[in-house]
Image (cartoon, rainbow, N blue to C red):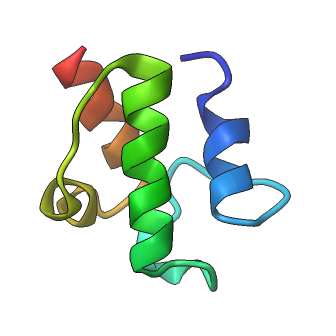
Amino acid sequence: MENFQSLISEILEVDNIEMSDELESFDAWDSLTILSIIAFCDSEYQVELSKEEIENSITINGLKELIKNKM
């Protein structure tokens, strides 16, 4: 998961992120972004996530932990 932060920041359309940043705080946060995260997790980590799981993650770190727990 070494490229996680850079790939997520690309999806969120920002230069850099902090692991404590809340997902909903990003300007690019919408249903298309959630679909992009679902596709990213499936292709990069072979992990299936639901919209609800992503939204319940709340932070970047929460999302990372969710993915790690499903691997």
Image check: 47 left or right of 36? left
Q: Is residue 64 above or below residue 44?
A: below
Q: Is residue 38 above or below residue 69?
A: below
Can the viewer see residue 30 in this picture? yes
Q: Is residue 56 above or below residue 1?
A: below
Which is nearer the eye, 52 or 60? 52
Residue 61 image offset from top left, x and y in percent: 42, 43
Total marks in image = 0
Q: Farthest residue toward the right? A: 15
Which is nearer the eye, 60 or 44? 44
Residue 68 falls in which quadrant of the image? top left
Residue at (63% x, 16% y) in the render: 2
Q: Is residue 14 above or below residue 40?
A: below
Which is nearer the eye, 39 or 59? 39
Residue at (25% x, 14% y) in the render: 71
Can the viewer see residue 22 in this picture? no
Residue 50 image offset from top left, x and y in percent: 17, 53
Residue at (69% x, 52% y) in the render: 9
Residue 22 image offset from top left, x and y in percent: 45, 68
